Image: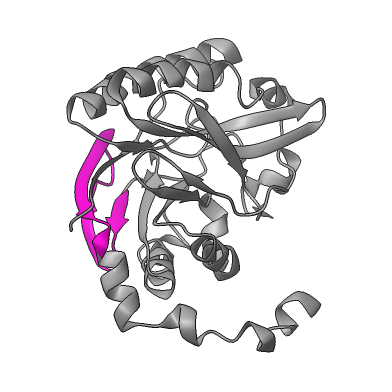
Amino acid sequence: MARMIKSGLIQMSLALTEGEGSIAEIKEAMFQKHVPFIEDAGRKGVQILCLQEIFSTPYFCPGQDSKWYKSAEPVPGPTTERLAEYAKKYDMVIIAPVYEKEQPGILYNTAAVIDADGTYLGKYRKHHIPHTTGFWEKFFFKPGNLGYPVFQTKYAKVGVYICYDRHFPEGARCLGLNGAEIVYNPSATVAGLSQYLWKLEQPAHAVANGYFMGCINRVGEEKPWNLGKFYGSSYFVDPRGQIFAQASEDHDELLVSEFDLEMIDEVRSTWQFYRDRRPETYDLLTKL
């Protein structure tokens, strides 16, 4: 029997940026810019919606300005509570990537998972933190410490990986072992060195682990940092590695697609990667 899921991804350019308002005003403008897209997703019957990495602010990591610490907030907290109202209104799971403040000086790049009835289910904290060529993330984030949780939502078992995490197959496998049916990867990545990997690594994760992925990237150029062009191209990929829906490279967009989770069982019955893996031979992975 088919298990159809309708999912949505929102890719977005900035509403306001540094110098165009206070941090609170910038965050509010970005939230309000997302609202029509969230409402549109709800009206279209989207069951699981994912937003982009730290969706309510610019990607401020090309600089190293501690004033952006003030944009961090508790999770659960004000933003997740506001989004929970939309989740309840539309019976829609929402994955909300935000800048999390656990306590002063302890800050994480986090994604909260809100169930369709508005219940906060938990959060994932980004594990792999880059610190190179404009991605000075270690200045802003501690590495995640909550493992690789999978959340039983109303519609599916959902896992989250965030941006730079996608370069590491180990965590992607952990999400599969933990039961994920769909893994969402909210990102902020620009044209250049790694763009060719955007359509390579995540389809590879989907194939190696036999699950669907929803991959989100913001759009536009963000001043005053001018790191480069965020090229959008958000997409869904199935367990065979086929990209079956893709957004534009340069427009704010809600990408909606429908897919059948029964494909997971079909693919895993053909490719028995979970049966044939040999964890007792992988000691080297944790020794070096």
Q: Is residue 78 left or right of residue 253?
A: right
Q: Is 261 placed above or below 153 here?
A: below
Q: Toward which corner of the image does residue 284 lie, by quadrant?
A: bottom right
Q: Toward which corner of the image does residue 225 lie, by quadrant?
A: top right
> Residue at horizontal 44%, vertical 20%?
83
Q: Is residue 285 left or right of residue 242?
A: right
Q: For this rendering, which residue is in front, 226 or 276?
A: 276
| Range drawn in magenta | 234-262
Q: Is residue 7 left or right of residue 21?
A: left
> Residue at horizontal 40%, vertical 83%?
272
Q: Quadrant of the N terminus?
A: bottom left
Q: For this rendering, which residue is in front, 52 or 184?
A: 184
**Colour theme:** one colour
Q: Quadrant of the C terminus?
A: bottom right
Is residue 235 covered in magenta? yes
> Residue at horizontal 38%, vertical 51%?
215
x then y, percent, for residue 26: 51, 16
> Residue at horizontal 52%, vertical 26%?
57
x then y, percent, for residue 269: 31, 79
Is residue 147 covered in magenta? no
Q: Is 131 placed above or below 256 here?
A: below
x then y, percent, for residue 255: 24, 41
Would residue 22 be seen by someone viewing this image from the given angle? no
Q: For this rendering, which residue is in front, 82 or 162?
A: 82
Would residue 49 be seen by someone viewing this image from the given angle? yes
